Amino acid sequence: MLTVSEPVRLPFDPIERARELWVQRWGTDAHATSMATATSVMRVQQLLLARFDAIAGRHGLTFARYEALVLLAFSRDQRLSMSRIGERLMVHPTSATNIVQRLVAQGFVERVPNPTDRRGAFAVITAAGVAAMEAVTVDLEEADFGLGMLDADQHDTLFAVLREVRVGARDFTP
Amino acid sequence: MLTVSEPVRLPFDPIERARELWVQRWGTDAHATSMATATSVMRVQQLLLARFDAIAGRHGLTFARYEALVLLAFSRDQRLSMSRIGERLMVHPTSATNIVQRLVAQGFVERVPNPTDRRGAFAVITAAGVAAMEAVTVDLEEADFGLGMLDADQHDTLFAVLREVRVGARDFTP
């Protein structure tokens, strides 16, 4: 879903408003609270992604392509198989292929044959790819990942509660 | 970006791992923390959206189309102009048009002329649209919006910290 790239600067909290309407219609406070929390996660994700895409865009990238470059830079030998890229980025294989194709066209990644799998291929980050990734990283850090309004305690709290959700959803086993 | 629809059940926390690698490479604890918090928001959004899309799918909908139906049901006269739909769903006008076209094709929404704007049109929710929306709502509430692992205090905390982010990003003025 294409989302608006700018904060909308409403004169009221639209999620609080939605919670009130939910209670009026369905009368269940606890469920309205869950709806409001889930909607908050989604709206903050939209705001962060729009900001990160704008930052990556200054360097000819999207946030998704930047994430793929970070993944490659962080891997042993700076290379990964296509299937591993999709798995680690947690995206559909089609998306992983698309992301890598764009990076190859930009000269930020090279495809090399996989010696142990003739049908497979490795993606390798190039020197230009490392430079672009480092430039985006500097800008993201300068923007404090769009979270400069939170203090250290709020970061810890947010990370801890979201970790409960990830564990509860069985996204990983602690 | 197409994301994997299932939790990946990794044997370690991939975001904690990314934080460690970030500190190793760039050596900035505070920035690594912001990266980890931002990544947590994005991953939880993916997990929730995948779950909500699966639930809406049981009733022939996506979560985005369900959201449009809720918006119409909550509006005065159960109708909204196309431009207002995009604005309130916080999606690009093209996405709003696409969502409404799909709902019209399904018989959940009807387009009616706007008497005060000959080029504009209203979208109106139909009785079948209300029924589908109510059915998805029951299932989402039964699933506690994918957040059943959080207690009331954790909900309040998560909502409050995310509200700070929304206010700080100027998404609304309290």
Image: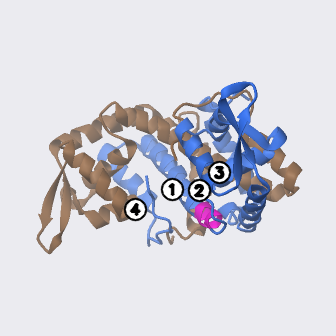
Chain colours: A brown, B blue
Q: What residue would you read off at disc 1?
A: B43
Disc 2 crowd, CA 10 A, few/some/many (<14, 14-19, 20+): many
Quarter occupied by residue B93: top right
Q: What residue would you read off at disc 4?
A: A92
Looking at the image, is B54 positioned above or below residue A106?
A: below
Q: What residue would you read off at disc 3?
A: B104
Disc 3 crowd, CA 10 A, few/some/many (<14, 14-19, 20+): some
Look at the numbered disc 2 and give the secondary structure of its residue.
helix
Chain letter for the residue marked with disc 1 in the picture: B
Chain letter for the residue marked with disc 2 in the picture: A
Q: Which residues are magenta?
A: B51-57
Residues at marks 1 and 2 touching, judged by CB atoms closer than 8 Å: yes
Q: Nearer the viewer, residue A158 or B120?
A: B120
Q: What residue would you read off at disc 2?
A: A162
Q: Tell me the distance, in whole angstroms, between the alpha carbons under discs 4 and 3.
A: 29 Å
Q: Tell me the distance, in whole angstroms, between the alpha carbons under discs 1 and 2.
A: 9 Å
Residues at marks 2 and 3 touching, judged by CB atoms closer than 8 Å: no
